[in-house]
Image (spheres, grey):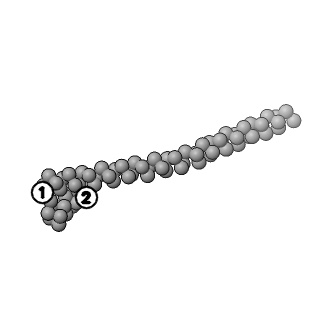
Amino acid sequence: MNVKLYDFARTKLNLSESDAKEFIQTIDEVVIEDIKAVTNEYKSLWKDDFYTLDRRILESKNDMYKAMFVTSLV
């Protein structure tokens, strides 16, 4: 995909070879940083959900163990 952007920068924007490369590298860096930021936001959102899910699973396991223990006494 970078080749297409490079060709576009060279022909349509009339940039020199070095300027076109720098332009494409800058676009790549910006996109990568945006992806990292969005990924971190999603990690933050899901972190609480996974913590809650883990806690609920642990509570359910404890409830099952209690129920099994009580029935074994009867």
Q: Residue at x 26, y 52 (%)?
A: 26
Say if 66 sits above or below 27 in the image: above
Q: Residue at x 16, y 54 (%)?
A: 19
Q: Residue at x 33, y 53 (%)?
A: 31
Q: Name the spot of residue 15 as percent of width and height, x first.
A: 15, 59
Q: Residue furthest bottom?
A: 12
Q: Which residue is mark 2?
A: 1
Mark 1: secondary structure: loop
- Residue 12 appears left or right of 49: left
Front-lying residue, 58 or 51: 51
Badge 1 density bin: few <14, some 14–19, many ≥20, Cα 10 Å: few
Q: Which label is found at residue 26? A: none
Residue 11's image quarter?
bottom left
Badge 2 density bin: few <14, some 14–19, many ≥20, Cα 10 Å: few
Quadrant of the rendering where the C terminus is positioned: top right
Q: Residue type at mark 1? A: Ser
Q: Which residue is mark 1?
A: 16
Quadrant of the rendering where the N terminus is positioned: bottom left
Which comes sooner in the sequence, label 2 or label 1? Answer: 2
* Cβ atoms at labels 2 and 1 below 8 Å apart: no
Mark 2: secondary structure: loop
Say if 2 sits above or below 36 in the image: below
Judge depth for marks 2 and 1 and give the one in front.
Answer: 1
Q: Residue type at mark 2? A: Met
